[in-house]
Image: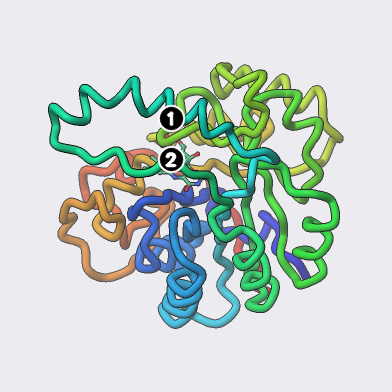
Amino acid sequence: MPFSLHELEHPIVQAPMGGGASTPALAAAVSEAGGLGFLAAGYKTVDQVERELAEVRSAMSAGVPYGLNLFAPPGHGTGKAEVSSYADSLRTDAQAQGVDLGDTRWDDDGYGEKLDLICEQRVPVVSLTFGCPAPFEVSRLQSSGSAVWVTVTTVGEASAASADALVVQGVEAGGHRGGFDDAHPGDVGLLALLQLVQAAVDDGLPIIAAGGLMTGRGIAAVLACGAMAAQLGTLHALSRSGNGARSTGHDEPRRSTHCAHPSVHGPDSPWHRQPVPSRPRRRA
Ligand SMILES: Cc1cc2nc3c(=O)[nH]c(=O)nc-3n(C[C@H](O)[C@H](O)[C@H](O)COP(=O)(O)O)c2cc1C
C-alpha cells in the first residue's frame, strides 16, 4: 500500500532542506515522533543519498514512513550566456568577499541516477522540486511503491502537475522557490494560494501546505484551509538534529499532543506551548 497522509499521527512534514539541514537524524526523529521526516537529495551524489537512506532506515523502527526530495530538471538548461552575465553582475561583490564564482555550467543534479536509486530502494514518499516530472516518471515511481508529491507555487503549476499530492509553497517559504514555471513565478501568500489551488484541482487531491508556518496556530490555519498536512522547514532547521542546530537539552524521544517533535525541539519551541492537531496513527 502506498503511503497515505492519514498514516501520520501528527499532520506535520519536516520540509526537505538541501545544503545540510535535512540530516538523517532529524528525519528519523520527526518520523518516529509521528510526523513525516524528509531527506534532501539535492546537491548530493547518488552514493551520498544511498548512505543517507540506509542511515535513516537504521535509525527508525520498521515500517515508519519517511520521504526523499529530489530536484527535477526544469525541462531546459538556462543559456550559458545568461548565467555568465548573471555571474558577471556578482563579480565585484564576490571579489570583495574573496569568493570564487566558479564555472558556469548546467547539470541535472544526477536526476536519472537518483530516480533509479529511489525505485530500487522503494522510498515511501518522493517529493519533486523545480521541475514537473513526466507522467512516465511518476508512474515508474508509483509502481515501485512511492507516493509522488510535486511542489507548486502557482495555480498553473498545480493544474499541470500529475501527482499523488501537491506541496503548495507560499511566497513566505524559506529557501528557494520550488516551482517550475519560470515564465510565471509565483508570489502569492500561502493562505490565498491554498484556496486558489483547491478551486482549480480535483477535490480530494491531498495538499501539503508550506511557507512561514512556525506555530500550532499557523498549522491549524492551513488545516482549516483544506491542507492535509503542514510542511515546516525553517523551524526544523533550528532544531538540535538539523544542522542549523542549537542545543535543546532534550535527549529522550517523548510524545505529547503539545509537541509534535519533542525529540528535536526544546522547551522554548512553540510546540511546547500550543497544542497541535493529532490523529490515531496507522502504520503500514
Ligand atoms: C535552508 C533551506 C533549504 C531548502 N531546500 C529545499 C530543497 O532542497 N528541496 C525542497 O523541495 N525545498 C527546500 N526548501 C523549502 C522547504 O522544503 C519548505 O518549502 C520551506 O522551508 C517552507 O517554509 P518555512 O521555511 O517558512 O517553513 C528549503 C528551505 C530551507 C529553509
Lateral position of residue 183 relative to residue 219, left or right:
right
Return the x and y of residue 172 as percentages of the image width and height: 46, 24
Front one among 145 and 203: 145
Q: Secondary structure at mark 1?
A: helix
Q: Circle 2: is it few (<14), some (14-19), or many (20+) Cα within 10 Å?
A: some
Dot placed on the residue nearer the N-terminal end, 2 or 1: 1
Residue 93 is drawn in which quadrant? top left
Front one among 69 and 197: 69
Q: Are marks 2 and 1 in contact (CB under 8 Å)?
A: yes
Which mark is on residue 104? 2
Q: Is residue 269 above or below residue 263?
A: above
Q: Quadrant of ligand 1?
A: top left
**Residue visible at 79% across and 56% down in the picture:** 138
In the rendered image, the quadrant that contains the C terminus is bottom right
Residue 189 is drawn in which quadrant? top right
Residue at image mark 1 = 84
**Residue visible at 56% across and 24% down in the picture:** 190
Front one among 221 and 21: 21
Mark 2 CB near ligand 1 (8 Å cut): no
**Residue visible at 41% across and 24% down in the picture:** 86
Residue 208 is drawn in which quadrant? top right
Q: Amino acid at mark 1?
A: Ser
Q: Is residue 100 among what the camera can see?
A: yes
Lateral position of residue 150 relative to residue 136, left or right:
left
Count of marks overlaid on the render: 2
In the rendered image, the quadrant that contains the N terminus is bottom right
Which mark is on residue 232? none
Return the x and y of residue 121 as percentages of the image width and height: 63, 77
